[in-house]
């Protein structure tokens, strides 16, 4: 059972004696610090060793769904490739810099591509303590990266990186504390997923088994349109100004504020045809995130969208935004949209305007939609409370990592 947030705060703010802490170079506290192959083989579907890249590593998580392979024979003759073992720390050093994961022994035979480094800490260093050190110093690692097309960290930079090294018992206490905070966040994120499942079950209960009248989207929407990226691309974005919504911000039933871009008034005028209004529904129409859908939050307006996101503006007398959004993110409709996006003639997934205009949806009476919206609004209110709690816990986690790893 996890402690309450109040008791956790009371315990972790007890002063830790840092007088016995030392600062040592990373190369001096690890028995191994190496990266992987610069030239991974292609076309081997299944073999003895899975080659892990930066795309497989996330903070405290590894995803083994997409990888290249290496035969045992090739592994043995290639001395740059080092076998990995339980307790090794994997750190991404090219592309998505600074993500890290500690091997627990269940991952099978792994080896590395060039974008990942492997570290074996000495016996007096906790692997998870070192993992949290890198998570807490992610911004510094990114700042020190080199390169133009793709930035990276050199091994010699890592070797000379200074690390605060408390006694092992202090390291273990720090890890226990940070693990606890992370587990609190994870549990609350799972609660959010359960609320989303509940909302979908309400949708199917109310609308799934009834044969309502069908309409094309162009008949129930007053606008279907996407925008463009301002001249100069991401280099032209501003630190503040008018929001520019991109596909990375649009998730199913969730708007992600992280990495929200901004443009100035002059750039926004060039995109006046895609001005966002309250209750607009956003739909990703290109790329790997195609078909993701959410309602725009009011607090980012004024806003525009780029070419990868479509505005779907409901005719209020016919269809509600909440109904449209939940209709499009339902399992059946997501399957249809994803299938339609994979045209044989297209080089990537896409939902062009002419296809969206003719897309057919079921339309229940407005009164029934309003009844559904009331139920969903109550669920969303509960979700907001959980999100606020997650933000508070995340703030506490960040402050503790700042304290330990400054």
Image (cartoon, helix red, strand yellow):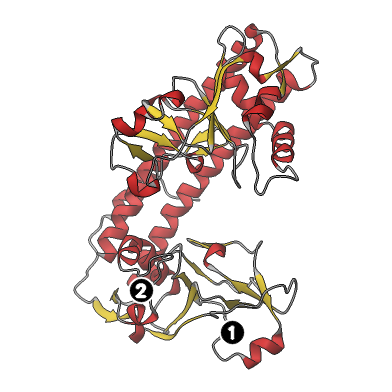
Q: Would residue 301 be found to the left or right of residue 213 on screen?
A: left
Secondary structure beneath dot 1 equals: loop
Above or below, 173 against 201 in this view is: below
Q: Position of residue 63 (x, y in %)?
A: 60, 61
Above or below, 284 against 24 in this view is: above
Above or below, 69 against 348 in this view is: below
Q: Position of residue 335 (x, y in %)?
A: 73, 37
User: Which is more toward the observer, 317 or 378?
Assistant: 317
Residue at position x 55%, y 62% in the image: 55
Q: Would residue 371 be found to the left or right of residue 180 on screen?
A: right
Secondary structure beneath dot 2 equals: helix
User: Which is more toward the observer, 39 or 23?
Assistant: 39
Classify the position of the C terminus by image quarter: bottom left
How many dots with numbers?
Answer: 2
Residue at position x 48%, y 32% in the image: 227
User: Which is more toward the observer, 351 or 78?
Assistant: 351
Q: Which residue is mark 2?
A: 169
């Amino acid at each position: 059972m996890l402690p309450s947030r109040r008791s956790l705060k009371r315990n972790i703010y007890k002063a830790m004696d840092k007088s016995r802490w030392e600062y040592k170079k990373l190369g001096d506290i690890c028995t191994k610090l190496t990266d992987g192959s610069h030239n991974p083989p292609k076309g081997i579907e299944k073999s003895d060793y899975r080659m892990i890249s930066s795309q497989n590593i996330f903070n405290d998580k590894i995803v083994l769904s997409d990888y290249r392979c290496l035969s045992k024979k090739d592994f043995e003759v290639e001395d740059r490739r080092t076998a990995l073992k339980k307790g090794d720390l994997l750190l991404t050093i090219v592309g998505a810099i600074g993500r890290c994961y500690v091997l627990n022994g269940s991952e099978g035979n792994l080896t590395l591509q060039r974008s990942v480094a492997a570290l074996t800490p000495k016996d007096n260093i906790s692997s998870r303590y070192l993992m949290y050190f890198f998570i807490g110093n992610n911004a510094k690692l990114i700042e020190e990266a080199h390169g133009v097309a793709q930035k990276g960290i050199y091994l010699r930079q890592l070797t000379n990186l200074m690390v605060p090294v408390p006694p092992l018992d202090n390291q273990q206490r720090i890890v226990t504390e940070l693990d606890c905070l992370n587990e609190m966040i994870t549990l609350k994120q799972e609660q959010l997923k359960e609320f989303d499942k509940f909302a979908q079950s309400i949708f199917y209960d109310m609308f799934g088994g009834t044969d309502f009248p069908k309409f094309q989207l162009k008949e129930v929407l007053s606008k279907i349109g996407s925008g463009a990226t301002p001249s100069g691309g991401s280099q032209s974005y501003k630190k503040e100004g008018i929001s520019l919504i991109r596909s990375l911000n649009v998730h199913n039933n969730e708007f992600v504020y992280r990495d929200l871009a901004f443009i100035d008034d002059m750039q926004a005028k060039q995109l006046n045809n895609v001005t966002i209004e309250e209750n607009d529904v956003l739909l990703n129409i290109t790329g790997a995130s195609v078909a993701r859908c959410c309602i725009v939050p009011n607090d980012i307006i004024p806003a525009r969208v780029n070419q990868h996101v479509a505005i779907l503006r409901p005719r209020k007398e016919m269809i509600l935004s909440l109904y449209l959004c939940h209709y499009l993110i339902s399992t059946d409709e997501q399957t249809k949209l994803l299938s339609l996006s994979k045209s044989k003639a297209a080089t990537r997934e896409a939902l062009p305007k002419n296809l969206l205009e003719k897309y057919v949806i079921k339309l229940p009476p407005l009164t029934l939609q309003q009844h559904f919206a009331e139920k969903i609004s109550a669920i969303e209110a509960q979700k907001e409370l959980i999100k606020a709690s997650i933000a508070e816990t995340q703030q506490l986690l960040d402050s503790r990592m700042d304290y330990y790893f400054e």
